[in-house]
Amino acid sequence: MLYPQKLNQKKGNLIVKISIGISVIIAIILIVVNHYITPNIKWAGIANAGIIYIWITIIYAINKNTNIAGHVLLQMLAIAILTIYIDYKTGLKGWAINISIPIIIIIANITMLILTIISHKRYIRYAIYQLVICLFSLVPFYFIYEKMIVHKILSYISTGVCTINFLVTICLCSKEVKDAITRKFSI
Amino acid sequence: MRDKKRKTLEWRKLDNSAKLFPISAGKKYSTVFRISAVLNEQIQPEILEKAVRIALEKYKSFRVKLKNGFFWNYLEHNTKEPIIEPETDYPCKYINPKTNNQYLFKVTYFERKINIDIFHSLTDGNSGAIFFKEIIYNYLEMSHPEEFKEEIRTYRKAEYTIEDSYIKNFDKKAKNNNSSKKAYLLKGGKLKLGAISAIHEIIDLSKLKEEAKNQNCTITQYLTAVLIYSIYQVNFVNPKNRPIKICIPVNLKKYFQSETITNFFSYITVEAEMEKENLDTFEKILEFVKKEFEKKLTQDEIKKTMSGNVKLGINPFIKAIPLVLKRPIVRLSYLEIRKYTTMTFSNIGRIGIIGKYQQYIDNFFMLIAPEQAEKIKCSACSYENKITVTFTSILNNDNIEKIFCQFLKDKGIDVHIESNGINE
């Protein structure tokens, strides 16, 4: 016999598929409950945004082939979007862009700074994520420029931390950054 | 001692034909081929794992993972080890670049059989066979250490390169010779999504050689004619008068100077207009195929086909399109391009094994992935006195395969059938 009798018996993703199905059902139930029980307060959207965030994190974590810098970038973006959405759903008081996003950017940049300093020999694997994080970290600077921010201090700090992170990166790993750009933009 | 050197990441661009595979491939169009070796003993997975690791030390170009660039995909050195698993899936399934520790090949085993499924971006059938043979040699040396104690395979230490031989050998001025006619596409119900039938027709090589010699043709010409005849006999409802077009990959290393271990193949297309050319008997079909080979299997014609494809890959406008846009454009155009071939028939020829090792190996198979337009694909390789023609199919009947086999039997050629039992 040259082949196994039962082929294609893969059930690897079945648990994930079932769990996603259950999440969708829960999300629908939340919307229905919200609609009939407390129609004046739209809390179901926030709860469902939380479910989506959890799934983004889980699916990314299941994929073993992503490195730690990729996780930092993903979390930075996902939490930023989540806080903006919650702010929007709770009356757009501006706490997301005034406080949350600068703090998220500071944490992401400090994490990357520590990674760069303690493991710069492996930096070749972080370089491209680092550049994208630095790029996104300029967003608060744009908010200041556009006068969208009332409390500017955290945004100044986040821009400062990002600049330090970028300079340290260039000093320690300029070759890797150059190589990463060459690889990614090779034509 | 602790390595104080800063690591640099080894990477390389994909060769000209490999560029298109990651952009166009998916679950329905895997661009994966498989080579299998049937040994005369049960496979020991631990030894197989070691054998693959040792082979990767020699053939470093296989120790890579596929990465997305802004304009093209590229290959990056893979520090992880490949995963060796028992065979549980259909052959030639899409290799998701994020699974299997990101390797672009997958080694599986079942009882006496070792398989390697290779994503075409990595290499072509001939170079894939070289790497696979290295795995088999390593495996046998480790499973029979006494037997191969004094075996030093220094004479096989050929140096391979990873140069893009397409760029080195193409001709800027060569005119494109591609046919503009769409092909006749095979008809019939399909297997459930994802299922692939594999039928191996193990043919007595000496008798086939004799028959081909009597007909004054090569084995590939003869089998191509039998294929066209089989399609014509059982699967030819052709109101649009479309030709049966058989695509035959050609190993370019036979025509151009190249030591590359990456892709270096082109193809010729035998275009049989059954009604127009009045090809209603096998003899007429064979004569036609011989003429087509004579006309198309020349260095000039092959260079034209190869150069046409290279020119597309180096076109500055195409190069400048970001990968995210290239992907949908290429996938859409491939839906159309695939309609220009009825069936691919790939014969990688003889798989030569060093004498001492032959006693442990029963046979080799070559398989290529079928897809929605080319519902059956056919491949062949020979080992000792056997040539195995393998049909991989997504059709839910095996009429063409049966007629092909019966035809050879009627000519007095012994044929033995093995399959994965999907179409039984």
Image (tube, grey):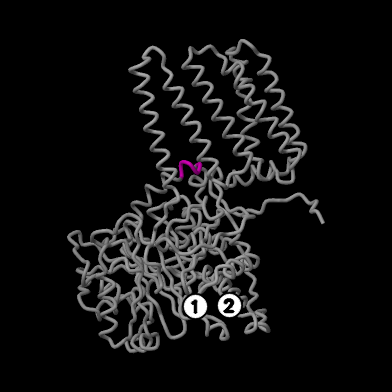
Decide: marks 1, 2 in contact (CB < 8 A)?
Answer: yes
Going by the numbered disc 1, the residue's amino acid type is Leu
**Quadrant location of the N terminus of chain A in the rendered image:** bottom left
- List x then y, in percent, for residue A168: 76, 34
**Seen in the image, is A33 located left or right of residue B76?**
left
Using the image, name the chain to which the residue with label 1 belongs. B
Quarter holding residue A29? top left
Residue at 28%, 62% in the rendered image = B395
Region rendered in magenta: B322-326
Going by the numbered disc 2, the residue's amino acid type is Leu
Quarter holding residue B276? bottom left
Q: Report the residue that reaches farthest toward the left.
A: B239
Task: Name the chief secondary structure element in magenta.
Answer: helix
Q: Earlier in the sequence, mark 1 or mark 2?
A: 1
**Seen in the image, is B266 located left or right of residue A108?**
left
**Seen in the image, is B205 located left or right of residue B284?**
right
Using the image, name the chain to which the residue with label 2 belongs. B
Q: Is residue A31 magenta?
A: no
Q: Which residue is mark 1?
A: B39
Q: Report the residue that reaches farthest toward the right.
A: B1
Residue neighbourhood size for the residue with mark 1, other residues' Cα within 10 Å, grouped as few (<14), some (14–19), many (≥20): many
Q: CA distance from mark 1 to mark 2?
A: 10 Å
Give the vertical position of B139 relative to B376 (above or below).
below
Q: Which residue is mark 2?
A: B140
